[in-house]
Amino acid sequence: MRKRPLGQAGVGPARHSRTTILWSALVLILLALSLPVRATLLQSGTKNQVVLQVQQWLVLLGYLKHQPTGYYGALTEQAVKAFQTEQNIVVDGVVGRETFSLLRERICQTFRPTDVVSSNPDSGSLSERRSFYETAARNTRSTPEAFPVHGELLSWDQVKQVFLIGDTARVLDLETGLSFRIYRHGGHLHADCEPLSPKDTAIMFAVFGGKWSWERRAVIVEVGEHRIAASLNGQPHGRYSLRNNNFFGHFCVHFYQSRLHKNGKLDPTHQQMILKAAGIKESKDL
């Protein structure tokens, strides 16, 4: 009878045991992922930047009367409960997916058609500016791909002559119809910008679906008498100048033929968004 080598003694059962444990763990993970998730995002004791923006939403909507801090305490919980009561949903003081989605929806409804005052009071009459933004808001909500409002296709060399470092401007997002003010912090190959105030940061946060991201979005940037086709991302990074706007970094705003600071190259996705914002559907040499 052939003997099993000493080093292999017990290998079969041990291997079987490990395999069973691994498969059991995998099954439990898959079951957990398939179960209905209450998806608690924020609750009492949470402290992060999302809490800060949700608190600012609650301030803008009139539910929270105190300065946002980024800490989810008793006052925030009370404000959330008041919002949930008004929305006729489960009142638990916790910001889960439903509450978060409804808060963002309310921000969009509240600020889409009315928050239209220009950063430059001399750039046309108030009624003209309101007409421009309200027309954009009405049309972009249902047919974002139609781009009924278009910006001028100005090259970066032209833009940097009218949108100087230290200037403010207003951004119109063509998909949501929301607008917010920005401050040009710096940048030499494109514009490095920051939201001008906590309110502008909160609206920008809603534009990006309640999360900061590198997603490129087609926008129009209003600077003086110019309404310029542009593209921006929504990821705070790098240096910043404004200390009280709840946005800890800057974001990038690209214009036609502007380039990335990291390598001096064109960003094709930014450039495509710019062409969309200009109402140009066909491909154009970049």
Image: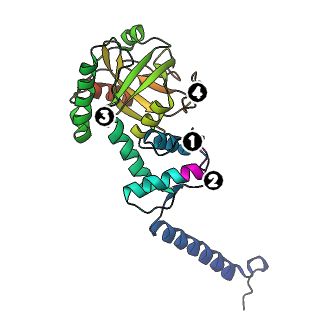
- Residue at the extreme bottom of the image, as rendered: 1
Q: Amino acid at mark 4?
A: Gly
Q: CA distance from mark 4 to mark 2?
A: 29 Å
Nearer the observer: mark 4 or 2; the answer is: 2
Distance from disc 4 to disc 3, alpha carbons, whole Å, reads 28 Å
Is 214 contained in the magenta span? no
* Residues under numbered marks 1 and 3 in contact, where contact means CB atoms less than 8 Å apart: no
Q: Position of residue 155 (x, y in %)?
A: 35, 14
Q: Is residue 102 above or below residue 222?
A: below
In the displayed structure, 38 sits above or below 246; it is: below
Magenta range is 69-77
Residue 195 vs residue 126, the one in the foreground: 126
Is 72 a magenta residue? Answer: yes
Q: CA distance from mark 1 to mark 3?
A: 24 Å
- Picture layout, residue 108 above or below residue 5: above
Residue hosting label 3? 177
| Quarter of the figure that contains the C terminus | top left
**Residue denoted by label 4:** 238
Q: Nearer the viewer, residue 253 or 126?
A: 126
In this view of the protein, can residue 20 be seen by the observer? yes
Q: Quick one: SS at disc 3?
A: loop
What label sits on residue 45 in the rendered view? 2
Q: Which residue is mark 1?
A: 49
Please give the name of the residue rendered at 67% of the width and 82% of the height, measured from the top-left corner.
13
Q: Quadrant of the N terminus?
A: bottom right
- CA separation in Å, label 3 and label 2: 34 Å
